[in-house]
Image: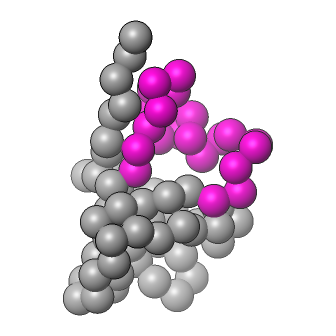
Amino acid sequence: MSEVKRVKIKVRTPSCVYVGELVIPPMRKRVSDVLNEDSNLFINLSDVVINGDERAEFIALNKNMIVSITEL
């Protein structure tokens, strides 16, 4: 059985920049697989830094608000 993969990403929205860890489930391989899932309207990030100074353990971002994503 495949393991869960954790990927550090930077997400830009119209108002903020988030840097955090995205969990990619075993049945998926890439960040784009998670983004293209129609069943989920949000992506979940953990250990998040918001705009370079604020921190959060967890955040759920509406995929419709995402301008860009960069894998770090």
In this orientation, does residue 17 appear? Answer: yes
In the image, residue 67 lies at what x, y percent? 57, 68
**Res. 10 visible in picture:** no
Residue at far right of view: 38
**Residue toward you, 6 or 51:** 6
Residue positioned most to the top: 1
Kindly identify the residue that appears in the image at 33 percent across and 78 percent down. Answer: 56
Along the horizontal axis of the image, is 5 left or right of 45? left
| The magenta stretch spans residue 36 | yes
Give the colour scheme shown: one colour
Foreground residue among 68 and 29: 29
Q: Quadrant of the N terminus?
A: top left
> Number of marks in the image?
0
Q: What is the quadrant of residue 38 in the picture?
A: top right
Residue drawn at the location 23% of the way across and 88% of the way down: 53
Residue sitting at x 31%, y 42%: 6
Q: Is residue 43 left or right of residue 5?
A: right
- Above or below — where is 4 with respect to 60? above
In the image, is residue 72 above or below residue 25? below
Q: Residue at x 52, y 87 (%)?
A: 15
The range drawn in magenta is 22-42
Q: Position of residue 44 (x, y in %)?
A: 50, 58
Residue 30 among those drawn in magenta: yes
* Image x and y of residue 55, in percent: 28, 81
Percent x, y of residue 3: 34, 23
In the picture, measured across the screen, residue 16 lies left or right of residue 8, that is right
